[in-house]
Amino acid sequence: MENDKGLLLVLSGPSGVGKGTVCKALREKMPQLVYSVSATTRAPRVGETNGVNYFFKQKSEFLHMIEQDQLLEWAEYVGNYYGTPRKFVEDTLAEGYDVILEIEVQGALQVKEKFPQGIFLFLAPPDLAELESRIVGRGTETEDSIRNRMEMARHEIELMDKYDYVVVNDEIECACEKIQAIITAEHLKKDRQIHKFRKWLAKGV
Amino acid sequence: MENDKGLLLVLSGPSGVGKGTVCKALREKMPQLVYSVSATTRAPRVGETNGVNYFFKQKSEFLHMIEQDQLLEWAEYVGNYYGTPRKFVEDTLAEGYDVILEIEVQGALQVKEKFPQGIFLFLAPPDLAELESRIVGRGTETEDSIRNRMEMARHEIELMDKYDYVVVNDEIECACEKIQAIITAEHLKKDRQIHKFRKWLAKGV
């Protein structure tokens, strides 16, 4: 029997929220979850393996991948290119494995345009949720500082709106359990189940 | 701080699938889950309490509830009326509790029309999933028997299409865990989270 197609889980959120830590803890709990390997033009460091840590590319190759729409997202940082190869993700999903992509917000929004069927998960900093109590609290912060925080919070909440799920990263263990529940539930969605029943029904007739 | 609104979980599926057993096991694991109490015109039995086992109603009261659209669904069985009072469900959800409604398929589809924001969960019999192996198996069944099973399966799969999630009831413990994951994930959906952030943001400004 054919494998069920895997899910692309896009784990994202504001910088400093702890995406990397949560992603690592989650992969330890779910060894079957495949980590999306990025392509980059930067030189490999000692101990890094092509196809494991990164797909190492020449700049011309990378530019060719952009042109051919072979990247779900890409960006340039300090003279090097980084991106998510579409083929690795699609091949792994087709084999029936779930893929996790850990990425900052702008990258996630690019992925959403090219791969809207992904599951987009916004990891929210606990201090976003705690902001209210601080604001209505004893006024130890200056008005400017509060205004800045509010502005940042407002921006983050507007980004949150593009995602499917919001998980507050108050405690790693707890955040992992919530993400595992999301993965389980997504696999149980009717549209991901009914085709299996329909398929063998068609075969049996 | 205001409570989050609860979810209405509609647990349904073909007769004999074990809805009652799964619902009971789930309530034992999740005591905070509120069981939707039905209204009925049948007489209370010894030990039954009004408002706990059922809301016991006179026939005229029940007909009035139908007229006033106070029931999310209703049906008549052997001369008695049974239905799901909308008010009990809505009040409990407004208090922030999740409600579980265990109901046969026709009732669930009525609820879906009146309360589409519910989470509709189709409990599928394991023999539906096992049908294929039986059909492609050693041919111990007559062609008529296979045809009947296929017809029933086809009907059940068409009903499945109206639901949000499909859980195969192969093992009660396992089915309960899946349903718990669905409840957790549904609460983490962006639309159920972002309003909380927006609310205090508005307050803080």
Image (cartoon, coloured by chain):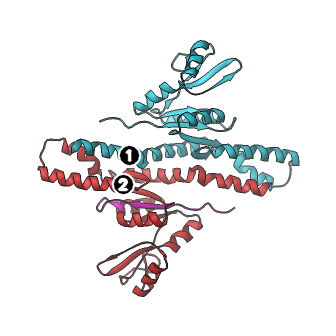
Chain colours: A red, B cyan
Chief SS of the magenta region: loop
In which image quadrant can residue B43 be found? Answer: top right
Type of the residue with mark 2: Met
Residue A182 badge: none
Q: Is residue A10 magenta?
A: yes
Quarter of the rendering occupied by the N terminus of chain B: top left
Could you say where residue A35 lies in the image, as x and y percent from the top left? 46, 67
Outermost residue, front side: B67
Residue ID for mark 1: B193
Could you say where residue B54 lies in the image, as x and y percent from the top left? 56, 20
User: What residue do we see at 48% from left, 33% from top?
Assistant: B33
In which image quadrant can residue A53 be found? Answer: bottom left
Which residues fall within the magenta stretch?
A1-19
B35 shown above or below B173 = above
Q: Are callouts 2 and 1 both on one chain?
A: no
> Between marks 2 and 1, how big is the CA–CA gap?
9 Å
- Can I make out residue B106 in this image? yes
Type of the residue with mark 1: Gln
Cβ atoms under marks 2 and 1 closer than 8 Å: yes
Q: Secondary structure at mark 1?
A: helix
- Can I make out residue B24 in this image? no
- Compare residues B104 and B136 and report the one nearer the observer: B104
User: What residue do we see at 27% from left, 50% from top?
Assistant: A128
Q: Is residue A55 magenta?
A: no
Q: Is residue B41 left or right of residue A170?
A: right
Residue ID for mark 2: A160
Chain ID, mark 1: B
B91 shown above or below A166 = above
Task: Tell me if mark 2 has few (under 14), some (14-19) or many (20+) residues whose alpha carbon lies within 10 angstroms of its own.
Answer: many
